[in-house]
Image (cartoon, helix red, strand yellow):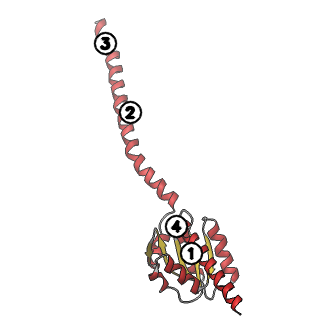
Amino acid sequence: MEKKDKFGKLCKERMVAEMVSRFKAQPNFIITSYMGSTVSDLELLRRNLKKTSSSYFVVKNSILKTVFNELKLKEESAKIDSGMGISLSGEDIISTCKVLVIFAKDHEKFKIKGAIIDGNSVPTEKVKALAGLPSKNILIAQVVGGIKAPITGFVNTLGGVLRKFVYVIEAIKDKKPETSNQ
C-alpha cells in the first residue's frame, strides 16, 4: 500500500511539473468548465483550436489548484469548481478566444471561467470582448494601412505639385516660340 502512495505522489508531482512548464512556455491560457460536454464535442473543440496553434486539455482540480499555487495565481483557484479544462493559446490569443466563445455559444454546458493573459487575470466578460476583436493579422494590416495612408497622400500631393510644375514649364515653352516669332 505504501508503494502505491509513493507512486501516486510521484505521478502527481510530475503532472504538476509538466503543467507548470507548459504554462511557462505558453503563458496565455483560458480556464474553462467542460462538465456536461461530450468527448466528441471536446474533440471538435481541440480540432478547431489546433487551427489557431492552440491546445485544450482536461485536468484534475487538485492538480490545477497546486499548479495555480506554484504559479502564484491563487485568485484563479477560486474558479475551480467542476471538471476543468485549459486552453493554451498560440501566438494569437484573440483567435483562441473566438474559437472558445463560439464553442461555448453552441454548447451551453461549456463555460469560460476566465483567462490569464500576459500574467494578468482576465474575467470572462473580457475574454468575450477579445473574441469580438479582429484577429491579430487583421489588426496589424489595419495599423499598417493607417500608417501608409498619410504617406501615400503626401506622395500623391508631391506628385501633383510636380505635375503642375511640368505643365507650367511646358506652357511657358509653348508660349516662348510664339512671342519670339512676332
Q: Residues within 10 Å of mark 2 (few under 14, many from 20)?
A: few
| Residue 69, image x, y percentages | 49, 80
Task: Specify the quadrant of the image occupied by residue 2.
Answer: bottom right
Residue displayed at 71% across by 88% down: 3
Q: Which residue is mark 1?
A: 100
| Residue 161, image x, y percentages | 33, 32
Residue 176 disc label: 3
Please name the amino acid that badge 1 sits on: Leu
Question: Residue extending furthest top?
Answer: 181
Tell which circle, 2 or 4, labels the residue nearer the N-terminal end: 4
Q: Is residue 135 above or below residue 141?
A: below
Please name the amino acid that badge 3 sits on: Lys
Q: Helix or strand or loop: what does disc 1 sit on?
A: helix
Q: Which residue is mark 4?
A: 93
The tally of labels here is 4
Please name the amino acid that badge 4 sits on: Ile
Mark whose residue sits in front, 1 or 2: 1
Does 146 sit left or right of 175 as displayed? right
| Residue 11, image x, y percentages | 66, 81
Q: Is residue 41 above or below residue 118?
A: below
Q: Helix or strand or loop: what does disc 4 sit on?
A: helix
Mark whose residue sits in front, 3 or 1: 1
Q: Helix or strand or loop: what does disc 2 sit on?
A: helix
Mark whose residue sits in front, 4 or 3: 4
Mark whose residue sits in front, 1 or 4: 4
The Cα–Cα distance between marks 1 and 4, rounded to whole angstroms, is 11 Å
Residue displayed at 56% across by 75% down: 100
Q: Which residue is mark 2?
A: 159
The Cα–Cα distance between marks 2 and 4, rounded to whole angstroms, is 42 Å
Asked if marks 1 and 2 touch (Cβ < 8 Å), the reply is no
